[in-house]
Amino acid sequence: MKPWTEFDFSDVVPEHVAEIPGHLAQIAYPEHFKTVMGLFLPIYKAKERSERALALTYELIELNPAYYFVWDFRFEIVRAIGSDVFDYKLVGLTPSAPAQPETSEDGEFVNQFTLSKSKNYQIWNYRALLLDRHNELWYRGEKLIVSMVLEDDAKNFHAWSHLRWVITQSVKHAPQAFDAVQLLADCTALLLEDVFNNSVWAYRFFLLKTYPSLFDIDEELKLVTAHIASAPSNESAWSYLSGVLDDKASSTTAATSSAVQFALAFQDEPLALQFLAEHAQENVSTYYSLLAEKEPFAKSFWLAQVAE
Amino acid sequence: METSPSVEAVIELQSKIDDIFAGSSEQDLNTHTRFLRMMLGVDGSLPSPFVKLDASHPWLVFWPLNSLELVGSPASPEEKARAAETILQLQNPDGGFAGGVGQSSHVIGTYAAIMALSYGSPEHWARINVGKMYEWLMSLKQPNGSFITCEHGEADPRTSYCALAVATILNIVTPALTENVGEYIQSCQTYEGGYANTPLGEAHGGYAFCSLATLMMLKRDYPRYGLEKYCNISKLSRWLLRRQDPAAGAFNGRTNKLVDSCYSHWIGGCWPLVSQVLDVVDNGQLWNRQGLRDYLVKCCQFKVGGFIDKPGARPDAYHSNYSLCGLALAQHIYTLTGSVFDWTSQRVDVGPEKEVVPINPIFGIPTAQAVCMGTYFTPQTPSREEYQGFALYVSATVALLLFLAWSLVPQEWLHSINVVYFPSRYWAVAVPAFILVLMLYIYIGLDAYNKEVLTPSPTSLHTFTDIDTMVHDEPLSEVNKKMYS
């Protein structure tokens, strides 16, 4: 990939980029920025979809990853000049079709960028835009990139969101891309790594709803109660327990009553009291009164639930 | 030859510098003015690292401008006009506002732009291209009820909130704009009770606020509608309750995550919205206001001005604005009294610091400010009651004039203008006289009825009270009240 400096821009009349006198919150732009943006703006306005325009987008995205309009333009260029093939060399996969040298560098840029700026909204949206070929390999590649990001930042909201999106898409377009049983097993392993990681619990709930055949309420009950027993103050686990039991499609009354029996042993724990108040058949108002006692900051709130 | 200072000297100097500039302390809220004015760039440009925020110009103006207003040291009218000019420069021909000059329109920036423009004047508001704005918002609308941020952009409850807030203030909400919006937001509520960026996602404070506020804007004059129809209030309120760390007092944005001052607004801001539909009245003890106030005042104020997300961090305009919003939420109980613009606030004593200006919990700007701009874009058509009242007033006046003419004007004059058919004028005196006498008889009759019928005779059992047991007769309704209530 050639840097923008190696392209010829002699035919472009650069725009004057500067602070506007009298206006508020103006930024003292560095000279380098003024030059690049000055060249980019006329090309952007002329909708020139070319290699040199692409080179400018790299530079600007490096300067400010949140340039949504540059990402948008970049997507249009990539579409127009056909260099939208991802390169999964980075993550140990080979592309399905032989990629051209420039394009594989392009894919590498996107991958590297994802790893270094994983909290940026635009990069994830950009990946999703490019991912329209519905190829099994690509879906697996996306999952690998997500795993790499999660290794550094296990609660990265964007990465988890992207993973859910990739799986949802694969179910529609390439059902063979993932083995659902394996996904759930991986998720179980992640819970063992950090039982307080709420993103994993939310992901597990997503998996059960996406692959309903995996949803065995007794299995889930076994897993979540074991985790609660090891860490009774874990809000994520209690919420998940309520979540699976409240799911009308897969839950049973037998499961609820066995969970209530289980929770009776943890009555020192406000989360357990809340669970009992919501799911037990009897003594509901007692549990709310106990909650009001244990959590004086929410006294009015819990007492109001007693009255209901 | 130059000599380097010793390591000890450098460390000592560093610790002195840290002591002067860094760290948080309990301090007067006025100490933030200088920092906020610097962030607003009143006297000079922001330094070059702010290029990273070059696509967020509306926010760069909005955050410090709003913060200054909340903290009670507002920008001058001249500075507000400068702010409005800065924002109007970002308006694109398609109707939306850009993140910076030359950039395309973006709905999140457009929200910040409109909120910042609320500090302008009608002269600036007249320059907003409202018609084009509507078309542009509609172009972002997706069949599932969500909005995308810009062309090829992402969609989530943030964008729904920004789109509807803009449309509500500019009064361009139509059934077409809100179609499926409630259903979409509903689909983002998770098993935990909070809201995620997509269906089946992980509940998050930012999306929770945006979702709730969006639901409240579905019907401008009946804000509770969206919450009642599309939200599981019980699950949501319990999730909200658990976002407040009992020890720190601050809110986190997701389960088992660290607290951050910006969630003072994203989670704290959910409370005034949700408490409008809860069965329990917010008496100041619904959530821990004191805890939030203590965290913000004691832990988040940077010594040289500005608020930080948590101790050890650096201040910025974003956290300053949402910390101050958090204080405005902790210091007041908010009650909805009408449309999305009509809120009253009642002061709660949480600490000795000055009162932060109460905000409109839906828009995050001072209540009066939202009313002012909202009113400008609302055509002043009289209500049905006003029409009825006026008609009644006119007909009553006409009836009185006719009566006076009939009873007082000499008969010859009426005949001379060819008015010959009217009742005998005897009735003009007789009817009022009959009414007066009837009233007199009613008074006499009532008096007689009380004495002769309602008063029991002195020998009646109803008048006895047993002096030992104090038992006496009571009407059946009183008996029922005492026995069964």
Image: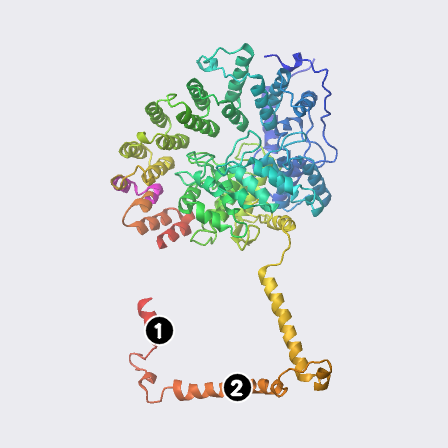
Residue receiving disc 1: B478
Rendered location of residue B435, percent (x, y): 55, 84
Colour setting: rainbow
Magenta-colored span? A257-274
Amino acid type at image mark 1 = Glu
Judge whether residue A262 is colored magenta: yes
Residue at image coords 59%, 87%: B430
Residue receiving disc 2: B438
B410 versus A236 height, above or below = below
Q: Secondary structure at mark 2?
A: helix
Give me the disc on residue B305: none
Q: How many marks?
A: 2
Compared across the picture, whether B456 is left or right of B428 comes to left
Q: Which of B375/B397 is in front?
A: B397
Rendered location of residue B262, percent (x, y): 53, 38
Q: Is residue B137 visible?
A: yes
Residue at image coords 53%, 10%: A100
